[in-house]
Amino acid sequence: MSIKKCIPGIYPKEAIPEYSPESERKVYNAIKEALPSNWYAWHSIKFKSRKENDIEIDFVIADPNRGILVAEVKGGLLRKQNGKWYQYQNNIQDPSKQASKCKYALIDRYREKNIIAPPIENIFFFPDTDASEQPTQGNMQGLVIGIKELPHLKKIINDLMVNALPKNLRKKASKGWVKFIHDLWCERWIPETKLYCRTKKGIENRLKLDKYQFNSLCGALENDKVLVKGGAGTGKTVLACELARKEAALNRNVLMLCFTDALGINLSKAFKEQNITAAPIGKFAVNLLRNTGHKITESYTHEFWDTIPLQAAVDGLPPEDKRWDTVIVDEGQDMGDNEWELIRECAMGKKRIWIFMDESQAFWKERNIPDDFLDKCFKYDLGRPYRCPPDIQALVDAYSGKESETVLIHSTIKDGTIKITKSIPSKVHENVGKEINELLKEGFEPSDIAVISLRGMMFKENIMHLKTLGGNEIVKATDENIKEYIICDTFLRCKGLERPAIIVTDLRFVSDNYNTRMSIAVSRAMGVLRIIGAKDEIEKDFVLSKLLF
């Protein structure tokens, strides 16, 4: 919500609403003409008080040096007779009682907000009543402006203020007492939804498509062997999980394998069903061998993780009749020959096997699904992605070599969905920290944010090797506390782990597969995307350079 700054003058500035009584229209015009340059006035302030359901003050006039006049306006011919007030022939409430009710309600409202109010008194406008003398009623004497006085308000307004509030402000009123009235009157209310709220709503709307996508896929899955293709954000992993649960509910033992460690760890935590085994294929191979008595020491080398699946396929599997009924493979595009050999052995016999893959995110171009799987599988294409907002998806498409709507991306750079920051190289990681803190101010939780490096984890300058960013603790994608902290990891290790807010960085020194790296990283963003890199690297990016220059 946006509230405009209050400057001296009358509010509303042009004219009061057409439905306002003629008596208030006369008073408004007179005050507008008479108001000193450093005073304030507001027409029709409405609020609720603790003692009265609804309060409406006709006019409030404020002199910053003295205080507030609460003005009651009564149109028509007024008189007081036999101790009673009349408007024409109708008996009415004593105007001073109505004015006092408004005055004390305003004082009470200040107290509710712990604001020290300035002196507040009542004045009265009777713009249709012609009288030679002021009423002698004690709380009104010298404070009534009738039909004769109204045209001369400019000359008498200072005296009127002094008469009502004889002394300059002595009591220390709170600094914001004028702004409090202005906010109460409410000059302007333009709803401005915080970025986080807009992001959350968009995610909720898009994820409703998961059910539709699953229902449309069910027919294809009546087949025992199915290959499901879909780009980033088409819901492959969600659908694979739903299929695993469906099979488990039919008392089938289910094995769900993926390539990325972080995804596999999270999948294993997601399933409560005892007859579902979920794991990254490398860790799965290690556990198979250990369970059969092999002593395995994990080594963070390519050779170890390349050969361990084949060793598990030969020496680690249980007898064929003890294996799984259903095998589900996610991230099929990343599996190498040895991984496929292990998968083949796991699915040996008349077993169901479903494979999910995204060719556009294939990082190792030499890896392919074996022909014997391709030949036997029913093929299904998930179609258009829906997990990312359309503008971010357009960016993903651009990096994947597809046609994209750059106009759409341009528009959302303006509304804050996408933000690209050029930095000097030494300040890139510092700027990532600043952006994290900006997102936190917008309402995002630490667990909503992931920082993705385009470099591998062995690169010593990778941002993932830091302990904190912007004063905030960060964890790797494989950490057990990813539901509480900001993730900071590589583009490959974050595959399958979407987050409402993604920050892509470490564009420097990327020598190969730049577009694929960017496509994978950018497609993790379910709501907002930030790209932070050195100025020269962003200018070299064929997509970003078109957006910024």
Image (spheres, rainbow, N blue to C red):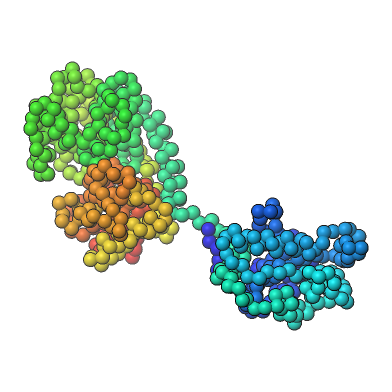
Q: Is residue 496 above or below residue 515?
A: above
Q: Quadrant of residue 374?
A: top left
Q: Quadrant of the C terminus?
A: bottom left
Q: Is residue 134 above or below residue 184?
A: below
Residue 28 visible? The answer is: yes
Of 270 and 116, the residue lying toward us:
116
Residue 154 visible? The answer is: no
Work out which residue is located at the far top of the displayed protein and give it: 321
Of 505 and 375, the residue lying toward us:
505
**Where is residue 479 drawn, in percent x and y?**
24, 44
Q: Is residue 186 above or below residue 284?
A: below
**Where is residue 75 drawn, in percent x and y?**
82, 65
Of 18 and 354, the residue lying toward us:
18
**Where is residue 355 drawn, in percent x and y?**
25, 31
Residue drawn at x 14%, y 19% is 319
Q: Quadrant of residue 432?
A: bottom left
Image check: 208 left or right of 536?
A: right
Residue drawn at x 22%, y 34% is 279
Work out which residue is located at the far bottom of the displayed protein and give it: 155
**Where is residue 521 drawn, in percent x and y?**
28, 49
